[in-house]
Image: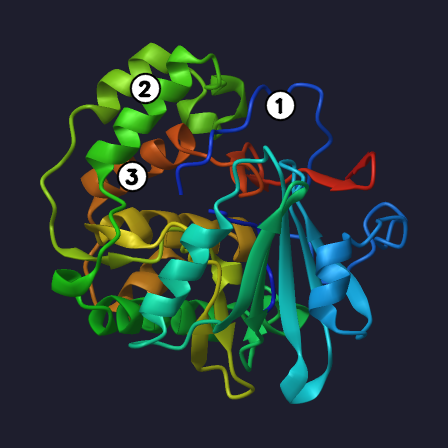
Amino acid sequence: MAGTASPPPAPAPGGVPSAGPAGSRKTLSRWPRPGETVDGVTGSGVTVPAPVAAAAGGDHCSLVWANEAGGLTFAAGTGRGRRFIKWAPAGSGLDLPGEAGRLAWAGRYHPVPRPLSQGHDDDGGWLVTAALPGDNAVSAHWIADPATAVTAIGAGLRALHEALPVARCPFSWSAGRRVADARGQAAAGRLDPAAWHQEHRHLTAAAALARAADIPPPERLVVCHGDACAPNTLLDPAGRWSGHVDLGLLGVADRWADLAVATWSAEWNYGPGWEDALLDAYGVRPDPERTRYYRLLWDLSSLPGRARVGAEGPVVTLRVGDREVA
């Protein structure tokens, strides 16, 4: 599901089953922009769930994100009253209470969306968050200025890692737990190598799991974002990072679990050649071994509604109403 400020793909972010085979899906090879018309569909055909309408309190709701698990994100209100409302239908596996808990904890130390309310009924659950100032790093303005965007992403990720205290963090995103979850997904037939990045597609699920079992020792434990793709960093008008969104997987892990994906995402969104600039802004030298490992683990632990890497970049499936659009 999308982030709660300028929603990117997402994350829904923990313990959600990975998506199944993608052979028949229409997909996007780049991030859609919030409010963008995709294949002529603007979201006007989507029925706003009653709890979302109630949470909006009479304000107009605009669909800004839809994911393959059925999750929807709506924007409501304007100005200081602007907020985002996530909807997870019953049975989707999207963990909105877990995301709310992570946001509430991280918000003590770092600018992230503030949870305002949440709830659930027989049809699903919802989470309302206040909007953060800033624009996401893949808005048209920052796509046209990748040097500024990549620098802000690297500096912002370092600031998040420095601000969130590992010793006080109650959440884990460890490689060991993610590998164990991937084994469970494989046993359930939910790992599809054809949906992985091209560099991993030659592997069988068993071979990939065998590689993932050889976990490199942590270079430095931090509280990771969990989905450090470019759209989850917000920038202010001057091009400085201003906050982070979509923290549904936040937890303690090696910082390369974030860095491997952040640098990969820089290539997906801005083109090749930006990896070193992001690492320079973060303040760390490249680590090819850990980068390779955590990119493989990313493919193994893809989640519904979060970008999964395809041959040309992140692969996102959108559904508006009962239509799958690309």
Lateral position of residue 229 relative to residue 291, left or right = right
Residue 52, visible in the rendered structure: yes
- Does 295 appear above or below 18? below
Question: Residue 273, how many percent across, how many down?
Answer: 43, 55
Q: Nearer the viewer, residue 289 or 196?
A: 196
The amino acid on which the numbered mark 1 sits, given as a three-letter code, is Ala
- Labels 1 and 2: the sequence-earlier one: 1
> Which residue is the site of mark 1?
22
> Which residue is the site of mark 3?
294
- Does 115 appear above or below 230? below
Q: CA distance from mark 1 to mark 2?
A: 19 Å
> Which residue is the site of mark 2?
183
Q: Nearer the viewer, residue 43 or 119?
A: 119
- Circle 3 residues within 10 Å: few <14, some 14–19, many ≥20: many
Q: Secondary structure at mark 1?
A: loop
Question: Residue 130, how many percent across, how many down?
Answer: 56, 75
Q: CA distance from mark 2 to mark 3?
A: 16 Å
Q: Residue at the spot x=58%, y=38% of the render?
A: 312
- Does 150 appear above or below 71? below
The amino acid on which the numbered mark 2 sits, given as a three-letter code, is Arg
